[in-house]
Amino acid sequence: MVVDRKFNNISIFNFNESWVNVEFNDPSSKNALSENMINDLNNFLDQIESSDKIRGISFKGSNGMFCSGANLKEINEIFESSDPKVKAHDISTSIGKLLKRIQSLPQVTIMVVEGAAMAGGFGIMCAGDISIVHSKAKFSLTETMIGLTPAQISPYVIKKAGFANAKKIMITAERFTGAEAKEYKLADYLFNSTDELNEIEKKLKKQILHCAPKAIIETKKILDIAFERINQDFIDYASKNFVDQIVDGEGREGILSFVEKREPNWRK
């Protein structure tokens, strides 16, 4: 199988016929989840989702950065659009659908996190099956700091960290390291060097490729149902929540303060 490498914001490394490596590659935005990044990821998944040859996908970030979350410059464009509520709803829904798609992929997904995974990038990590995290990586659910809610990503964070841990890091916007992420159950494995990462990935891939492929697919389906499959009703609710916060709530002030490089009016 040949995977199309003609993407603008992601790079594809097809090391062998059973495993594909995807790299977020938009250093100018710290690999933010821009509209182009999301389109690239969906186009890539269109090509490999139904493949019976690709058994696993590793997601990584370029230039020592996993993903900085939603592209706040694009979100700021909401206020300049002819219908801000429609624009906000579309942005939130596109992220929600991508998270659900990654969660439900038949392939095993490994998230390799270096640098930082913030907000939506944090959600991408949690939507994967297995996370390998650099001990000095940085994490935060920063939404409440800019007047928003981590709506679309919340079920994935709860799934990964558990309710109590997820609630704490959501409402405090706490910043923490990869080593602390292990304590929060967000990191399945920690590494400190490329050699350590390669060894962890090698062992995991060997274990996964020893398993029956259809058994893994069916197991993931069962787990997805047990997780109370993320459905369109939730994505719509989360999108409405995002619209309410950014158009009529505190989100406008939060985004503007970020773009204007000043403190929001609630900051103590």
Image (cartoon, rainbow, N blue to C red):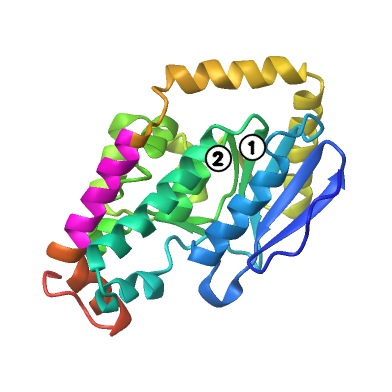
Task: Name the side, left or right, on which 20 lies relative to 225.
Answer: right
- Which amino acid is tagged 2? Ile
Q: Residue at x 24, y 68 (%)?
A: 84
> Left or right: 233 with respect to 124?
left
What residue sits right under mark 2 in the picture? 102
Q: How many marks?
A: 2
The x, y position of residue 250, in whole percent, is 15, 64
Q: Earlier in the sequence, mark 2 or mark 1?
A: 2
Q: Are marks 2 and 1 in contact (CB under 8 Å)?
A: yes
On screen, residue 189 versus residue 156, left or right, reads right
Q: Can residue 250 be seen by looking at this rendering?
A: no
In this view, 96 is above or below 189: below
Q: Considering only vertical position in the picture, is 154 above or below 21?
A: above
Does dot 1 land on a helix, a strand or a loop? strand
Query: Observer-nearest residue: 195 or 140?
Result: 140
Magenta segment: 233-246
Q: Residues within 10 Å of mark 2 (few under 14, many from 20)?
A: many
Q: Nearer the viewer, residue 128 or 6?
A: 6
Q: Is residue 142 left or right of residue 192?
A: left
Q: Secondary structure at mark 2?
A: helix
Which one is in front, 114 or 27? 27
Q: Quadrant of residue 97?
A: top left
Predominant SS of the magenta segment: helix
Q: Which mark is residue 187?
A: none
Q: Amino acid under label 1?
A: Thr
